[in-house]
Amino acid sequence: MEELILGMKLESFKSAVIVMAHPDDEVLWASSILSTARKVILCYGEAPNDARTTEGRRTVFDEFPLSTAFNLNIAESHCYDSTHWREPVETSYGVRCGRNKNSYKKNFHLLVKALEAHIKDGDLVVTHNPWGEYGHEEHIQVFRAVAHIGERRNIRIFVSSYVSDRVLYFMERNTPRLAAASDLLPTDKALGEKLMRHYQAHNCWTWEDGYKWPDYECFYEIVNPWAALRSDKLTMSSMPVNVIWLDEQTPTYTNALRSTKKRLISGVRSLLQRTGSKSFPP
């Protein structure tokens, strides 16, 4: 428990089990601890709406730069960006989606069954955060699957510190579930670039070409994955996060191009202290 209070060091994450949704998520959200992880588990393979990515993921693990990485090859449910992020509704299997709900729910049970074979008592598991980094329904689902396993096994769960402007409000409401942040850990930019090139060679790199990693990242331990969301009327204290700007406060015609604007602020930004009540559209 003293380690929880003082902050986790880089060496504390040696032999961690990293569980991420899609191939390339591991290096985007957890590059700092990849090289010393005991296992790197990627969950989804086939992308039903993207034949090129699907084909690339079938070969990308041939001569993969990380010998500890493997894919569970669960087909994606194709539900990304179908959630109303101003008023997200959490479910036991992730978040309420606006598309392919049955496939999404079915995948939760497939995930739990597959992950149970790889997560053991005593493991330190690093996974997606409960707001899905930039707001990805399958990231949230993977978090929920790991949390479900954590109810029956003695594991510690840590999540990434990345958040986008799209789900910043949802992230703030999730803070009762988080313990203090780990130390700021230097990202592994060399490994990141190596993996990015490998994914690009197999046509399944899903992020920005030429992406530049921030200097640091950190992780939060989950103290209670089922804790009630905080009120949106309470004061929000600052905390270290890496902010991804997707939507921004720009005109609608600019927001339509957001899929091409995945750029990450270099370095760790702190959330500004927020005071007073907030109102959001119904």
Image: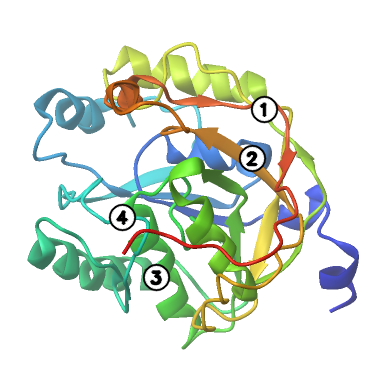
Residue at (28, 18) in percent of width and height: 202
Q: Quadrant of residue 95?
A: bottom left
Q: Which residue is mark 1?
A: 214
Residue 129 in sight in this render: no
Alpha carbon distance from label 2 to label 4: 19 Å
Q: Which residue is mark 3?
A: 144
Could you tell me which quadrant the C terminus lies in?
Answer: bottom left
- Give the mark, 2 or 4, whose residue is nearer the N terminus: 4
Q: Amino acid at mark 4?
A: Glu
- Give the mark, 1 or 3, whose residue is nearer the N terminus: 3
Could you tell me which quadrant the N terminus lies in?
Answer: bottom right
Measured from the top left, where is residue 229 in percent x and y? 52, 77
Q: Amino acid at mark 2?
A: Asn
Category of crowding for the residue at label 2, using alpha-carbon neighbours closer than 10 angstroms: few (below 14), some (14–19), many (at least 20):
many
Q: Are marks 1 and 2 in contact (CB under 8 Å)?
A: yes
Q: Which residue is mark 4?
A: 137
Alpha carbon distance from label 1 to label 3: 27 Å
Figure check: 211 above or below 152:
above
Q: Is residue 213 left or right of residue 205?
A: right
Measured from the top left, where is residue 277 in percent x and y? 60, 67
Residue at (57, 76) in percent of width and height: 230
Q: Nearer the viewer, residue 153 or 250?
A: 250
Q: Which residue is mark 2?
A: 242
Figure check: 270 above or below 215:
below
Assign a secondary structure to mark 4: helix
